[in-house]
Image: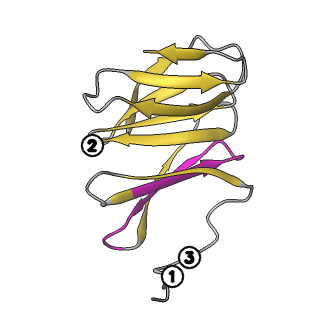
Amino acid sequence: MEARLAYGFHVAPGSLRAVAISGSGKYFVCGGEDEVIRIFDMQTNKSCGDLSATHKGSITALQFYQDSFLLSASDDCTVCIWRISDWSCIHILGGHKRAVNGLSIHPSGKLALSVSKDNTMKVS
């Protein structure tokens, strides 16, 4: 079976470093060196806008929790929690001393884990 490209396009001026798809498959997001998270609607193949001015470093990881929240991690040592209904940042998690490399959300949605270049893992 041959894989078929659904769509592809140039979305950022710098390198992209993270991508995620929402649980329902409605949204996908990507982020990278330009500190912007871009939001796309997979049903219409159109941009829904972007999330910027919160992270002050490259976006390093993105993870959806159901279709309710998006978590983003950055070189700025933080994890942001975004509410999908209005795409607002409702909380910024700190604690790391160096760039956050990755994150994961517990299936209950009550815990988030992040790992960092400071050789630590945080549970929030």
Task: In the rendered structure, find residue 66 and report the number of the disc placed on it.
Answer: 2
Q: In screen coordinates, is 66 left or right of 120?
A: left
- Give me the residue at 51% from left, 82% from top: 5
Where residue 110 sits, quadrant-wise, is top left
Query: Per the image, is 34 magenta?
Result: yes
Whether label 3 touches label 1, CB < 8 Å: yes
Q: CA distance from mark 3 to mark 2?
A: 25 Å
Pointer 2 local density, CA inside 10 Å: few below 14, some 14–19, many at least 20? some
Q: In screen coordinates, is 84 left or right of 63?
A: left
User: Residue 68 in the image: x percent, y percent?
Assistant: 26, 39
Of badges 3 and 2, nearer the viewer stands 2
**In the image, which residues are magenta?**
28-44
Query: Per the image, is 30 magenta?
Result: yes
Q: Amino acid at mark 2?
A: Gln
Q: In screen coordinates, is 78 left or right of 111?
A: right
Q: Amino acid at mark 3?
A: Gly
85 shown above or below 30: above
Of badges 3 and 1, nearer the viewer stands 1
Pointer 3 local density, CA inside 10 Å: few below 14, some 14–19, many at least 20? few
The residue identified by callout 3 is 8
Question: Colour scheme in the image?
Answer: secondary structure
Frontmost residue, 79 versus 119 = 119
Q: CA distance from mark 3 to mark 1?
A: 7 Å
User: Residue 93 in the image: x percent, y percent?
Assistant: 50, 17
Pointer 1 local density, CA inside 10 Å: few below 14, some 14–19, many at least 20? few
- Give me the residue at 36% from left, 67% from top: 42
87 shown above or below 91: below
Compare marks 3 and 2 and give the one earlier in the sequence: 3
Compare marks 2 and 1 and give the one earlier in the sequence: 1
The residue identified by callout 1 is 5
Residue furthest to the bottom in view is 2
Pick the quarter of the image with the N terminus. bottom left
